[in-house]
Structure formats: C-alpha cells, structure tokens
Image (cartoon, rainbow, N blue to C red):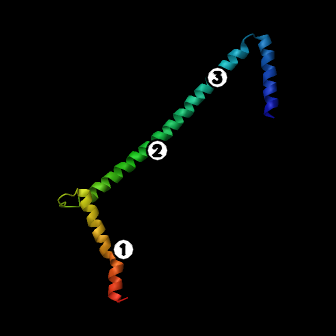
C-alpha cells in the first residue's frame, strides 16, 4: 500500500515539475528541513527526559547523602586510627552480631547444649 502511495506522489510530483520547474527540488528541500527540525525536536525531548532523570538522581543523591551524614554523626567519638565511617560500621557490625547472625546462632547452640 505504501508503495502505491509513493508511486502516486511521485507521478504527481513529476506532473507538477513539468508545470512548475524546480518545484520537486523545493518540495524535497522543504521536506528535508522539516525532517531535520523533527530530529531536533526528538533530540530536545530526549534531552528533557534525561534532564528529568538527572534531576531525580540528584534529589535521590541529596537524600542519601543527608541520611548517611545523619547516621555518621551519631558516632559521638570515633576510635583512634579509624574514620567516623569505619567506627560507625564497626558499631553496627558488633551490634548486629550480638542480636543476630553467626554470633547469636553460636550463643543459642551453646545455651541449648547441642
């Protein structure tokens, strides 16, 4: 079907070109300009979508940074030769190992005498 439409358009263009010399070239140039403009609009739409993604990521990063610093500054005193991050991480690991995980399983096994 598309081929039939293309053939009709081509035959009409040839007829017009016979009546108005150079009209086909002008029409083709106008179509090419519209296609280029359309490509620019498509690129702009993609850029806007990417910018929206970028802003979303920036907001998420700001939230994560805020939450991280909130957690990090709960460490009142860091240990010598450790960063505040390392001290916080060690505190969390020590606490988790006392209430769950392998250390707690060992304690349960010892208490049950298994």
Earlier along the polypeptide chain: callout 2 or callout 3? 3
Ranked by sequence position, the earlier of labels 1 and 3 is: 3
Q: In this orientation, which residue lies closer to the viewer: 79 or 4?
A: 79
Q: Quadrant of the N terminus?
A: top right
Residue sitting at 22 percent across and 61 percent down?
Answer: 75
How far apart are labels 1 and 2 at the CA level? 38 Å
> Is the residue 109 above or below the residue 43 in the image?
below
Q: Quadrant of residue 74?
A: bottom left
Residue 5: percent from the left, percent from the top? Answer: 80, 29
Q: Are marks 1 and 2 in contact (CB under 8 Å)?
A: no
Q: Nearer the viewer, residue 37 or 84?
A: 84
Query: Which residue is painted at 39% across and 45% down in the image?
Result: 58
Categorize mark 2 by other alpha carbons within 10 Å: few (<14), some (14-19), many (20+). few
Q: Tell me the residue that label 2 is attached to.
A: 53
**Residue receiving disc 1:** 101
- Which residue position holds label 3? 32
Secondary structure state at the residue bearing disc 3 = helix
- Tell me which label, 1 or 2, sits earlier in the chain: 2
Left or right: 25 as drawn, with respect to 58? right
Q: Secondary structure at mark 1?
A: helix
Residue 42 position in % (x across, y down): 57, 34
User: Residue 26: image x %, image y %?
Assistant: 68, 15
């Amino acid at each position: 079907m598309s081929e039939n439409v293309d053939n009709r358009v081509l035959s009409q263009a040839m007829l017009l070109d016979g009546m108005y010399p150079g009209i086909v070239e002008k029409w083709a140039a106008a179509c090419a300009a519209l296609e280029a403009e359309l490509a620019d609009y498509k690129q702009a739409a993609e850029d806007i979508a990417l910018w929206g993604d970028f802003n979303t990521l920036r907001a998420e990063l700001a939230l994560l940074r805020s939450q991280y610093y909130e957690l990090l500054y709960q460490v009142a005193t860091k240990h010598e030769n450790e960063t505040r991050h390392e001290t916080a991480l060690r505190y969390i690991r020590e606490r988790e190992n006392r209430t769950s995980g392998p250390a707690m399983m060992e304690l349960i096994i010892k208490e049950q005498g298994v």
